[in-house]
Amino acid sequence: MDAEDLADLIDVPEPIAARVTIRDVAREAGVSISTASKALNDQGRMTPETRDRIRTVAQTLGFTPNAMARALVSQRSFTIGLLTNDTYGRFTLPVAAGLAGAMVDRGVSVFLCALEDDPERARINLRAMQEKCVDGLIVAGKRIDRRPPLDLARLPMPVVHVNSAAAESDIAFVPDDFGGAKAAVAHLIALGRRRIAHVTGPDSFAAVALRAEGWRDALGEADLPCFGVAERGDWSEAFGFAVGCRLIMAPSADRPDAVFCGNDQIARGLIDALTLHGIRVPDDLAVVGYDNWEIFAAATRPPLTSVDMALTELGRIAGAALLDLVGGTRVEPGIRRMPCRLVVRQSCGAPAN
Amino acid sequence: MDAEDLADLIDVPEPIAARVTIRDVAREAGVSISTASKALNDQGRMTPETRDRIRTVAQTLGFTPNAMARALVSQRSFTIGLLTNDTYGRFTLPVAAGLAGAMVDRGVSVFLCALEDDPERARINLRAMQEKCVDGLIVAGKRIDRRPPLDLARLPMPVVHVNSAAAESDIAFVPDDFGGAKAAVAHLIALGRRRIAHVTGPDSFAAVALRAEGWRDALGEADLPCFGVAERGDWSEAFGFAVGCRLIMAPSADRPDAVFCGNDQIARGLIDALTLHGIRVPDDLAVVGYDNWEIFAAATRPPLTSVDMALTELGRIAGAALLDLVGGTRVEPGIRRMPCRLVVRQSCGAPAN
DNA sequence: CAGGGTCGGGAAAACGTTTTTTCTACTTGG
DNA sequence: CCAAGTAGAAAAAACGTTTTCCCGACCCTG
């Protein structure tokens, strides 16, 4: 009883249509492996006819090159890692989408590593990325003044930071909080508002300081005073709501005619409170948010004008920079602040067009 | 002038501390490559002393095995692909987090593929996954009655679906919409509500039918009538708000004493409308949502009782199933509906504890 | 017609592992 | 004291590519 008979008797789970390799292509086309490789990669010299023949054979056989064998010899895996501790996903997801989209166009795949603020997890993931020979790393965070718990020292591959803390010697991309805030406040000023307050998140966030600075700067340029100080609480609707309730108590002369909020949730809570007590937005008081979190901004009544941080674009750009780095192009270290975009809806009182 | 001199003159970008390979470990430990391999993988026989020596050498040299070389010979890449068209991320992100977490514990890395409902993108990504030799695929969608635009036929690797449409012959995990809805309504009944309405999303979603069925079933078991029919609109706050406004018009005798909403946004809009017009939630009318989207549920006034679909758990389980499949374990095909969990907050009128 | 150049293509090394096979030397039983 | 067995370790094949070198045939040129 030989092997063939056995195969008939034993219930083999699958014939496992062995993957077709370049060897199969070469044999079928009647050429050597090296010629086949060159034909498929558009390298070396050969008759166009030979090249075409090999190509059609590869096509009909359904040949798929083994990226790992290729990586082994070429020392490029066409693979990068995305490390993030923002499992909640508000910030990382758009970044990841932009990144993955830009990468797939260049034949690069992205490993997703969820860190969850756990140094042990971080270590494991970092090691996995090293073993898998990624060409580079994107480190994405949820705030620009903290970095995921990673020991990035002496890593053999290039690293690009996105929306996370970075040293001056790193290469990093973050949204331009100052510029975004300034644009938002300037827009309010252009609409005729003069008493513009700022309600924002906790002091501990670097973004809070930057946005407040943008607020002050825009007012200064228009020779307007700050209306009160930047009021800081947490990033929640509840805080916005509480501030809104306080505003209502004040005599209307002491009230601002516009509030620039540090994020959309605060703006939402604020608007809810005002609406509940009969203050009209934007007629009596204009509101602008930050983040342009669609699900919030669009659902607010009235729809919220907000600053978009262009996170998807940020992911795309960071990916491109990383690929440059991998390719050997020198990229100047430093923190690049990418422009934000004001999305005008109705809460700021802009005329509908 | 020899090579060494050149290295001194030319500004070499980096010495490129050549990756240390098992060959280096073997040489340093004074053994053959095969012995080194066996020592590091706890295989074969050798003096414990030899094994330890090799291990310490590997340790001090900072040896990292090359996963691709390993994969090449072992035909296992310890890598899987996550394909999703839910770039918005409401559903996929928790799934991805659960998946990635479970995988990293087993030494498996996850490729993130953003499809964006673009068949061309899908094709490219699928091909990349094949080239990168992933051991298996997770296909995640945003609704259980549509699947990402993929041609999964004749794929050489196992596939597990999560929260996406699947044939009976597929292996799929989806939340148990019927059960979740039933539990939510049963809870309202237990709290003494009798006139329980249902306001939910568009007819075209399979989840809408399932949740409505759960609502009917729970009422039936308690010998209660359906309050009206399941009212269907879109999944937005605006729709919930509109329904809320309509409820206010009705004489209070014709009003439900509880509303089970098809998602949290509808619930939020509904509560906002009711609050705005002086109807107290939950005293006059209890509300329960679906999705347990923390950012919504917790910010609603009062905080929203909602059904959690346990998406993270879903990702974890799907990953485990895929790994079983990869390992050769047979997994019964079929669609598995995983239990949902009711998260009780205050909008349902449950006594605080 | 000799010498060099180009053109088409093949052989083989290399990438870093795992695994099977082989080899050597030592132990042990009779 | 010899055959047989075994423990420890090395050799070599294999995984699927890319790439460098090489070889023979043909075409010019002088």
Image (spheres, coloured by chain):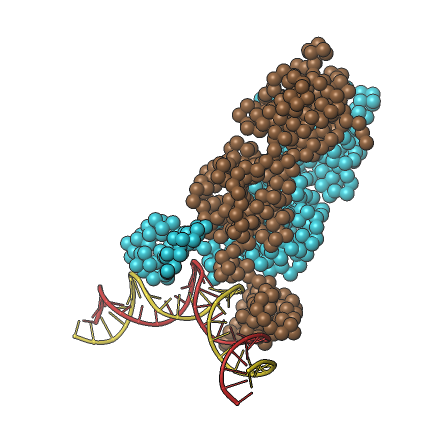
Chain colours: A brown, B cyan, C red, D yellow
> Against C22, is B1 above or below?
above
Q: Camera-side residue: A121 or B181?
A: A121
Q: Camera-side residue: A228 or B55?
A: A228
How many dots with numbers?
0
Occupied quadrant, residue B296: top right
Q: Is residue A34 visible?
A: yes
Q: Name the outermost residue toward the top.
A: A251
Percent across and percent down for residue C24 are 26, 69
Occupied quadrant, residue B219: top right
Q: Camera-side residue: A146 or B252?
A: A146
Percent across and percent down for residue A245 are 67, 16
Task: Tell me if A58 is positioned left or right of A132 in this view.
Answer: right
> Against D15, is A346 above or below?
above
Q: Is residue B333 visible?
A: no
> Against B306, is B75 above or below?
below
Q: Residue at x 74, y 39 (%)?
A: B208
Percent across and percent down for residue A300 are 72, 28
Q: Residue at x 66, y 44 (%)?
A: B86
Q: Residue at x 77, y 39 (%)?
A: B202
Q: Residue at x 73, y 43 (%)?
A: B206
Percent across and percent down for residue B353 are 58, 22
Task: Tell me if B228 is positioned left or right of B349 in this view.
Answer: right
- In the rendered image, the quadrant that contains the C terminus of chain A is top right
Task: Tell me if A36 is positioned left or right of B200 in this view.
Answer: left
Q: Camera-side residue: A266 or A308?
A: A308
Occupied quadrant, residue B34: bottom left
> Against B322, is D1 above or below?
below
